[in-house]
Amino acid sequence: MNLSALIVGCGYVGSRLKVFLEGNGWKVCGARRSVQSGDENITIDVASEFEISGHYDIIFYMVSAGAYTPKAYDTAYSVGVSNTLQAIRKSGQTPRIIFVSSTSVFSESDGGLVTEESPTRVTSFSTEALLQGEKKIAASGLDYCILRLSGIYGPGRNPLIDQIKLKRAFLKKEPVISNRIHIEDCVGVLHHLALLDHPDRLYIGTDSEPAPYNEVLTWLAKKLSFDVVAKESEASRSTHMSNKLCSNAKLLRAGYNFIYPNFREGLLSCL
């Protein structure tokens, strides 16, 4: 059966998803805020009302905020979602919509286990916007699935490797559990959820081995032949890191098999 998809937000993950789906016989249209000459993607700025042309079985909403500001997040995850849902209604279609969110919305921050049933909490403008987007998707009346991804890494996105090479990586003063998912598994999970007959409404997208940040940093530095001995002068947490142990058990029960089930296999593929 030939399936069709619209990828709203065809960026780092979306562009790779597009190539993967096309390689598996899908008809795919990728949409971005702006396109370069020769780019086969179409232009859709979700900040404004737009129309959808063509029929799609699946619509992936994976827009990212252009900056870490309240306006950028509100545009990407609240205004953008509203405009996309309006465009779908006007088109007369009833596709499944897969919304890419973040594990940052979970309230846990003391290293405890997090599952899909764990509570969420607004802790910043970014989590507020993400949760607003999720609520709008859930109230849309469409068949939908929300995927909360942990830290995405892979070719072209390896800040930890860059920091180690620049000698700007420091061990955390206090223990922090980190969670991550390789770009190839991001794509694989999105494809898997699109093909499920009756997916659940919410999944966590993360690999099978959450690990202490210091353990990951020390292991990676050794592989790069660098020494990391300095600790940060005072405890801190980056904007995109929170201390939680995210579980992918539900995704595994849904039949997904990870290409890179832990940080060692995933990071080795990037070296």
Image: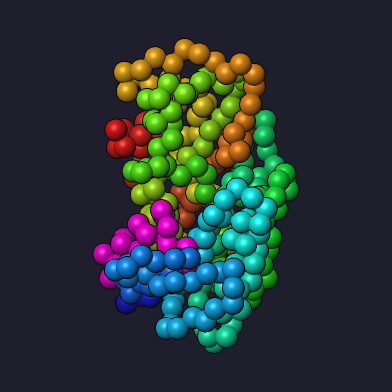
Question: Number of labelled discs?
Answer: 0
State the quadrant of the C terminus.
top left
State the quadrant of the N terminus.
bottom left
Q: Residue 194 appears at what percent x and percent y?
A: 44, 65
Residue 194 seen in the figure:
no
Q: Residue 230 appears at what percent x and percent y?
A: 50, 13
Q: Residue at x 58, y 27 (%)?
A: 176
175 up-or-down from 18: above or below: above
65 up-or-down from 167: above or below: below
Q: Quadrant of residue 84?
A: bottom right
Region of the chain picked out in magenta, as a range: 8-25
Q: Residue at x 56, y 55 (%)?
A: 65
Q: Nearer the viewer, residue 145 or 6?
A: 6
Q: Residue 213 appears at what percent x and percent y?
A: 51, 27
Instruction: Let me know if residue 203 is in the magenta part.
Output: no
Q: Residue at x 59, y 33 (%)?
A: 238
78 up-or-down from 149: above or below: below
Extreme residue in the front direction: 37
Extreme residue in the right direction: 122
Q: Residue 246 appears at what percent x and percent y?
A: 56, 40
Extreme residue in the top direction: 229
Q: Main secondary structure of the magenta part?
A: helix
Residue 151 as seen in the image, left or right of residue 154: right
Residue 221 as seen in the image, left or right of residue 242: left
Residue 247 seen in the figure:
yes
Q: Nearer the viewer, residue 216 or 199?
A: 216
Q: Residue at x 62, y 55 (%)?
A: 73
